[in-house]
Amino acid sequence: MEGFDFSFLNLRLLDMIDIILVALIIYYVYSLIRGTIALNILLGLVIIYAVYLVVRQAHMQLLTEILDGFVQIGFIALIVVFQQEIRRFLLLIGRNASLQKNKAWWSFLFGRKEIEKNNSARVKPIIDACKSMQKSRTGALIILAKYYDEQFYQNSGEIIDARVSKRLLESIFQKNSPLHDGAVIISENKIKCASSILPLTENDKLPPQFGLRHRAGIGISETSDAVAVIVSEETSEISYAKQGRVKMKVTLGELEKLLNKDF
Ligand SMILES: Nc1ncnc2c1ncn2[C@@H]1O[C@H](COP(=O)(O)OP(=O)(O)OP(=O)(O)O)[C@@H](O)[C@H]1O
């Protein structure tokens, strides 16, 4: 590292690494909460903190004391307000670490082609089911979760624990099925449960035609590492939600690519 001389800035290499790491964390946090209500809350908190710094500097006693109290409990408040984002952030770190490890081993042992073939076989029943449900205008909400939070998903749903198949997905969402309401959760290449009630997004900038099904799909993608495939009963269009953002009018080809990439 002798080639770099940052002495004129009085910066050590470790300081540079420090700055880069902080920038990466800010970027990660921003991309996690972009487009969600959490971004507005965070902006609000940053503004309050900036005001606090200004009034403290200006020696405005009363305001400083009020804001001081607020800032002191700020850390705990942050954890409470951003509980779900923190959870997602930690999941993301853990998941990336373990997946990268698995992928590296897998491609070392079987090569890239094998991974692609496996992925296609995994997502094919889902694509086929979506195609058929689109045709029959059957509403569906399919959640693909990398981390399966058993207690959370099964609380409201019915345990299935079966291999993913087109016909099983179709029969769950068929209008006369007792399980058609709610979401199907797929994880570890299995339909883990059906009829799951999910948290709804609070995003107020969604298209007006998005009802509860779409809001539930987007909601779970905001609060976990899961992605949601939503087939609209009304329009038969497919939407895809990931990290709180939603892609509309997804074609079957696009869906296959997205699932191969994300799942
Ligand atoms: N919290 C929830 N979690 C999971 N599924 C839900 C939840 N709330 C509603 N649903 C599902 O959404 C269905 C109602 O969908 P609604 O018509 O309100 O949504 P939509 O987004 O307009 O979808 P569509 O375009 O299919 O009509 C319910 O029958 C139920 O299956």
Image (spheres, helix red, strand yellow):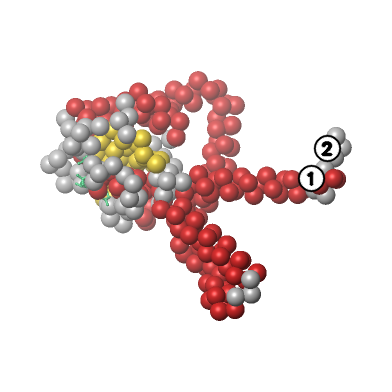
Is 9 displayed left or right of 30 in the figure?
A: right
Residue 78 in picture, x, y percent from top left? 51, 63
Q: CA distance from mark 2 to mark 1?
A: 9 Å
Local secondary structure at mark 2: loop
Question: Residue drawn at (34%, 53%), measured in percent from left and top?
Answer: 202
Q: Nearer the viewer, residue 203 or 93?
A: 203
Extreme residue in the top direction: 113
Residue 135 in picture, x, y percent from top left? 19, 27
Which corner quadrant holds the C terminus? top left
Answer above or below: position of 65 versus 171: below
Label 2: few (<14), some or many (≥20) within 10 Å?
few
Question: Residue drawn at (77%, 48%), measured in percent from left and top?
Answer: 14
Q: Which mark is residue 4?
A: 2
Residue 91 in view here? no
Of the residues shown, which amino acid type is indicated by label 2? Phe
Q: Which mark is residue 13?
A: 1
Earlier residue among tags 2 and 1: 2
